[in-house]
Image (cartoon, helix red, strand yellow):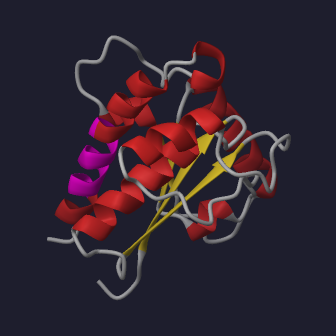
């Protein structure tokens, strides 16, 4: 376990779902004292919010849960992310397609990222994609999905080390 396992969460604008997942996963990583071996980031497929902090609804929810989002700023996914991250976790099917298109266009040497949908980590949910609270306003439901999925992903990562 000499190199870090790097996780990238991806949504459309990188202000609601993916930064929430980044903050929650970082929180779990810190709780388990694994920050030296797991690195977490997030990105968006669109460029509208580059440099902006998470959406007010995401910030309010994270504040209420006492989960830090300090220093988080929106960025857009790049072709090199497929090389830099072992896990690229997309919040919905369109993000998955957009990420695959970026990676296919980049044709990055040494690509090793495993691109998956976030909901593949959540058992028995009534949805197949993480709803975008930018449109639904339901940040709490998104948090519940993200909490469960991040816990599962962390367990999956730890089991790979054995």
What is the total number of numbered labels drawn onto the structure image? 0
Q: In this view, does 98 lie to the left or right of 19?
A: right
Task: Specify whether residue 153 is painted magenta.
Answer: yes
Quarter of the image with the C terminus is bottom left
Q: Which residue is at a point 72% across and 38% down the rendered structure image?
A: 13
Q: In which quarter of the image is residue 67?
A: bottom left
Membership of 147 in magenta stretch: no
Where is 62 relative to 37, above or below? above
From what the image shows, is residue 50 above or below residue 124?
below
Magenta stretch in the rendered image: 148-156
Residue 52 sits above or below residue 142 on the image: below
Residue situated furthest right in the rendering: 48
Q: Residue 15: where, in percent of width, then height?
A: 66, 41
Q: Position of residue 73 (x, y in %)?
A: 70, 58
Q: Which residue is drawn at 41% across and 26% down?
A: 140
Q: Residue placed farthest to the bottom in the image?
A: 2
Dividing the picture into quarters, in which one does residue 56 lie?
A: top right
Q: Residue furthest left?
A: 162
Q: Is residue 128 left or right of residue 103?
A: left
Mainly helix, strand or loop, the magenta region? helix
Which residue corresponds to the image point at 42% horizontal and 18% vertical from the top-left?
A: 128
């Amino acid at each position: 376990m000499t190199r870090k396992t790097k996780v990238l969460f991806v949504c459309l604008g990188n202000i609601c779902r993916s930064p929430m997942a980044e903050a929650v996963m970082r929180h779990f990583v810190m709780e388990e004292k694994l920050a030296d071996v797991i690195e977490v980031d997030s990105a968006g497929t669109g460029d509208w919010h580059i440099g902006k902090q998470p959406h007010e609804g995401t910030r309010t929810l994270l504040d209420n849960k006492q989960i830090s989002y300090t220093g988080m700023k929106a960025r857009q996914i790049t072709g090199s992310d497929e090389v830099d991250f072992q896990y690229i976790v997309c919040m919905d099917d369109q993000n998955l397609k957009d990420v695959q298109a970026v990676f296919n266009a980049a044709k990055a040497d040494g690509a090793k990222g495993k691109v998956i949908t976030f909901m593949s980590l959540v058992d028995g949910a009534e949805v197949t994609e993480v709803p975008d609270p930018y449109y639904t306003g339901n940040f709490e439901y998104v948090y519940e999905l993200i909490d469960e999925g991040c816990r599962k992903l962390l367990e999956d990562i730890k089991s790979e080390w054995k």
